[in-house]
Structures are given as C-alpha cells and as structure tokens.
Image: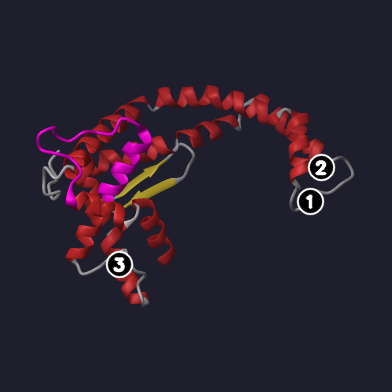
Amino acid sequence: MLRRTAHLRRTLGTAAGAALILTGCGTAATGPTVPPTPRAQDELLRTVERTLVDRCLDAEGLTLATKPRTPEADRRLQAALFGTGPRELSLTLATGHTVTAHTDGCLAGARQTLYGDQRRWFRAQVTVDNLRAEAQARIKGDPAHRAALERWNRCAVPPGTTRPERWGPAVVARCERESGLADVRARLETVELAEVRLLRADQLTTYRQLRDRALRRAAELSAGSTTGKGTDT
C-alpha cells in the first residue's frame, strides 16, 4: 500500500507545484487560459488534481507529503485516497484484462470535479489508455506475425539446443533482424492501431470531450475564478 501511495504522489506532482493553484496564476480580466501544448495541458491537469486531493485529505487531517508511520495510518490514508468497499467501476478490455476503481475517496472526488462524470471518464480513459495493448493483442493471431515469430524462435533456439532462461541482447538483436519480426510487428501494429481506433471511436470522442471539459475546469481553478469545490457538469 505504501508503494501505491508513493506512485500516486509522483503522478499527481509535487506539493510546491500544487501550491501555485492556491495563489492563482491568471487574472480576472483575461479569464482562464488553457495551455496550448499537450505537455503543458497534462501538467495543468496533474497539478490541479493534486491540489484537489490535498484539500480533501487535509479536511480529514491527512497528507501525502509524508509517509504514514504505522500500518493503520497507511490503511486510513489508502481509504481516504482510493475509497472503500467494493469497487463500483469496472471495465473488461478486449485483451481480457479487467480494470476497476472506486467512486468514493479523494482521488475520485478530484476527478469528478474536473471531468464531471466519473463513470464516463473511467470507461473512456481506460479504453484509450489501452488502445495500443489491444492492437498488439490482435497482432498475435496474424499469419505474418506467427511466421516471423517461428523464424525468430528457430534463430534463438537452433535445432538440438535447449531454450535458455534468458537471451542476451546480442542474440535478441540478431534474431530480430534475421527473422524480420520487429519490422512485421511495426507494420501490423500501425494497421491494427488504426482499426482499433475506428472500433473505439465513440470512446475516443468521449475522452476528448471530457478532457477538454477538465482542461477548462482546471484553468478556472488555476486562475482562482472558483473555489474548486464544485462538481457541476
């Protein structure tokens, strides 16, 4: 659990960055402005989300700034952050992997404030985040990929030898080149990713709409034009 909390702490960004939100970085005269680049937009969303989480935790006398000193303190922090009880959100991907999440807890509350609809955002985000994994899973059944993989295996494990526990980089590089496996994968992934994007077009549209909504909301909070406690959609 400590590892999970540390990962969230890194993902949400530093407390110093979050403090910028509390002081405001825009003016009422010009109104909130969404950053123009994807990297800056991602940073804005992370920073505002961290601020909202920090406010929620502070209301319960908790903080991400320091590690919990006892297992009980860690459990309390985990519950406040991620929610408790059965996970209400669940999505099984085309790859067979199932992703779940709570609708309560400070992190869920922050995302409700930003995105406006937790369930729609959860489904859209999980789907979009796994488009490449879905494309790669589809590649495995392609005859060209199977043939290239067989060539790679013959290269890495010649007849009369046994499969080693771990191949060295030189062997991997040589067999990738001789079998053409890397080229086949790259070509097929491009095709399959385009196909998957068409199949998941509805979720991609939802993802863009809710992300745009979150960026506007984050810009408003960053500019100090609202209290940051609303959950309007």
Dot 3: element? helix
Is 33 left or right of 124, judged from the image as shown? left
**Label 2 belongs to which residue?**
157
| Residue positioned 21% across, 33% down in the render | 33
Q: Choose between 39 and 83: the one closer to the eye.
A: 39
Q: Amino acid at mark 3?
A: Leu
Image position, residue 167 (x, y; %): 75, 47
Is 147 left or right of 131, judged from the image as shown? right
**Label 3 belongs to which residue?**
77
Q: Amino acid at mark 1?
A: Pro
Q: Nearer the viewer, mark 3 or mark 1?
A: 3
The reply to whether callout 3 and callout 1 are in contact (CB within 8 Å) is: no
Label 2, label 3: how many angstroms apart (C-alpha)? 50 Å
Q: From this viewpoint, is residue 84 visible?
A: no
Label 1, label 2: how many angstroms apart (C-alpha)? 8 Å
Residue segment shown in magenta: 23-49
How would you rate the neighbour count of disc 2 (Cα within 10 Å): few for under 14, some for 14-19, many for 20 or more?
Answer: some
| Residue positioned 31% across, 37% down in the render | 41
Dot 2: element? loop
Does 2 appear above or below 47? below
Residue 120 forms part of the magenta stretch: no
Residue 38 forms part of the magenta stretch: yes
- Number of numbered tags placed on the structure image: 3
The reply to whether callout 2 and callout 3 are in contact (CB within 8 Å) is: no
Rendered-image quadrant of the C terminus: top left
The reply to whether callout 1 and callout 2 are in contact (CB within 8 Å) is: yes
Earlier-in-chain disc, 1 versus 2: 2
Q: Which label belongs to residue 164?
A: 1
Image position, residue 229 (x, y; %): 13, 50
Earlier-in-chain disc, 2 versus 3: 3
